[in-house]
Image (cartoon, rainbow, N blue to C red):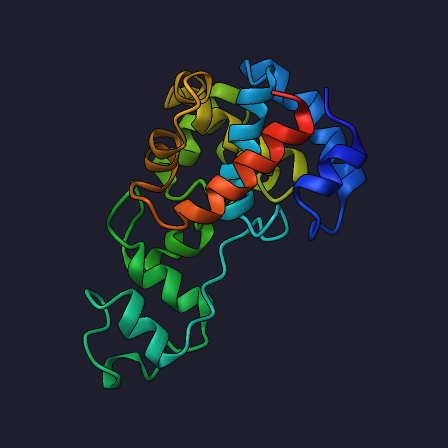
Amino acid sequence: MITETQLSKIVPLNRNISGLAKSINTILPKYGINTPARISGFLAQCAVESGQFNILIENLNYSSEGLVKTFRKYFPTIESTITYAHNPERIANKVYANRMGNGSELSGEGWKYRGRGAIQTTGKDNYSKLSIYLNKGLDEAVNYCNTLDGAIESACFYWKNNRINIYADAKNINAMTYAVNGGYNGLSERTAFWQRSLLILGA
């Protein structure tokens, strides 16, 4: 479906082209991501979301300044960040507590169910839905998302549930971006990946 050479031109900074190509060729067809336009859309969105498929587990190692900027609701002042800055586990447990099916900050579920995958699955509820679809136990699904295959398949599951193939078929990069990002962050970069992939795959 896609060769290592083609993929290396689309995501040149990826550090595991062989493994990525194998996962993509094995998993994407199961989710109907099987045309140049659909593959290009998937690759473009995931490339931006995951640093060209290199960052597949959420990075929560924020400085005090980063916490106030990114999570002002939870960290309104620099003083409020003192025991959290550069402590990813504590940060996750706070900012993801009591939502998305997670328990309290003390439950540790914010960290356990932090973002994983090429389109990050986050929160106990979303992992539960994925686990049911994959016919895996909840912990098994979480562990699967730590693997490259799991990172790709969880993104495909999101893609399918949100019917993003429709937007890919229409070559609507704005609609694809909104469906993945909830906004238009990185739209110019996504568009560049999209156009390059379409050209390389001959769409």
Residue 96 falls in which quadrant of the image? bottom left
42 on left or right of 200 = left
Above or below: residue 65 compared with residue 21: below
Q: Can residue 104 be seen in this view?
A: yes
Viewer-side residue, 167 vs 76: 167
98 on left or right of 29 = left
Q: Can residue 117 be seen in this view?
A: no
Residue lying at 40% horizontally and 44% vertically, measured from the top left: 122
The C terminus - image quarter: top right
Viewer-side residue, 108 vs 15: 15
Q: Where is residue 171 in the image (x, y as percent from the top left)?
A: 44, 23
Q: Where is residue 100 in the image (x, y as percent from the top left)?
A: 29, 42
Q: Position of residue 185 (x, y in %)?
A: 36, 50
The N terminus - image quarter: top right
Residue lying at 69% horizontally and 53% vertically, measured from the top left: 13
Above or below: residue 164 compared with residue 145: above
Residue lying at 27% horizontally and 74% vertically, measured from the top left: 68
Viewer-side residue, 95 vs 45: 45
Q: Position of residue 157 (x, y in %)?
A: 48, 25
Above or below: residue 23 compared with residue 65: above
